[in-house]
Image: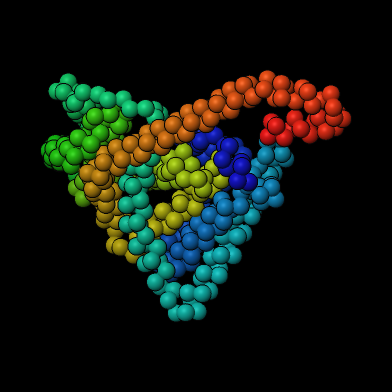
Amino acid sequence: MDTEVEQEAPLTIIGLIRTLTARATLPHLLGFFALVVALFLAVGGSRELEVESAAAFVGMGLAYAGVAMLAEQPTVRGWVVAEKGGAPWTLLTVLLAPFALGAVLAGVLLTAVEGAGVGSTLPIALAALFVAWSIGQGRSFRSAVVRWPTSTLTAAPRAPPGGLATSVRLGIMATLLVAVLLVQGALAGTSILTASVSLFDVLLDQIGLAAGLVVLVVVGEFLTAEGRRACGSDTWTSRMFGRWHVLAVVFAAWHLGTAWRHITSEQPQVATAVEEIVLMIVTVVMAVWSMTSKSSGSELGLVRRSNALFWGLAFGYAYAGSVAMLSTVVAGVSGVLFLGHVVVALTLLALLRSTGPALASRHAKAMEHAAMGARLSERLEEQTASAVEEDEVAAPQTEEATAPVTEAIPAASENDDVIEVVG
């Protein structure tokens, strides 16, 4: 098992997405959406089902985490994966084991908290995790960049970036922010359908958002000043940090724009649901990606092709459960979503300061280790070459030294003597 972990090729982001949507495990993804929708409806329809729904979310999350840890076992894999060429009904039977395990775990958890008289705290505890998931969303997004495998292990010095490089970076950032502003304006325009605001109000709100994005760019330049200096002397780190800077600011701008929409207008529930589902998918994918053997650099290889989907579903149930509980524990889902988006944006802004130095430090260590490995290889090659030369020089001397003896001793003793001399 350990050998397989070491020899498996790194899981790329494209490979991860393909794994998450593979036909063999697609029933789990569809089952996830069906169960999450059902639990959301149950929570929204009756406050009396909060505890049961919270237990269901936790139970399913733990069940899929257990499946993920055992997914490489042949027996378990046969239960949860619809192998190619299998019977059509296996697309349904693969759901039986995780759903049954989730039901059992949910029942045990529900019995335990009810028996202890703390059942009402379970929804609150799950809701409180929403802040952790929001912070984790920002951190996992950063990890995918900071822990990206170094493509070059040799120093590639570059001159300090001039005005042209800065202008290009700011130009790309401005273009993407304008796109964010336009999309946010289109989404805010759906609030006109609910008669909550007028077109003039939407335009005023977008002007306010545009001013906020300008402030965001200025703050981002201030927070990344140290990181740009730390990464500016190396081509690879400078390029990677520049990309992270742009993407982080744009991602933070999206979250701030969404938060702004939730406090200035009221979108149709369908539009809000679609947006949150997309963000949940991004959160799950980035969380799994940050744990892969390629991005984390860990020898454990916790997330692999064989269990990536199951880890993603475990995160998905926990994230969806937190949102569902917050929508009932906290008055109004708009306030909940506003809080979550603000937390993600602030997390990204806080990480802007530390990402550059962390990336430069990791790249420097990677080059240092590569240099040590190169020096060790050179020494081994030199020792091997020296040993070969000594053997070539010693061979004629051995023949001359043993030639007179071979006529006087038996063949067996001759062989023993030659081995001793060579030794």
In the image, is residue 388 above or below residue 8? above
Q: Residue at x 55, y 26 (%)?
A: 386
Residue 102: quarter of image: bottom right
Give whichever of 72, 25 is nearer the camera: 72
In the image, is residue 118 above or below residue 51? below
Q: How is the image coloured?
A: rainbow
Count of numbered circles on the image: 0
Q: Is residue 41 visible?
A: no
Residue 161: quarter of image: top left
Q: Is residue 275 left or right of residue 308?
A: left
Give whichever of 47, 244 is nearer the camera: 244
Residue 320 point in image, percent of width and height: 42, 53
Q: Is residue 321 visible?
A: yes
Quick one: which residue is furthest to the right in this view? 410
Residue 396 point in image, percent of width and height: 68, 20
Give whichever of 274, 322 is nearer the camera: 322
Q: Quadrant of the C terminus?
A: top right
Residue 154: quarter of image: top left
Q: Residue at x 47, y 34 (%)?
A: 376
Residue 235 point in image, percent of width and height: 29, 26
Residue 261 point in image, percent of width and height: 23, 45
Q: Residue at x 42, y 35 (%)?
A: 372
Q: Residue at x 44, y 31 (%)?
A: 375
Give whichever of 219, 129 is nearer the camera: 219
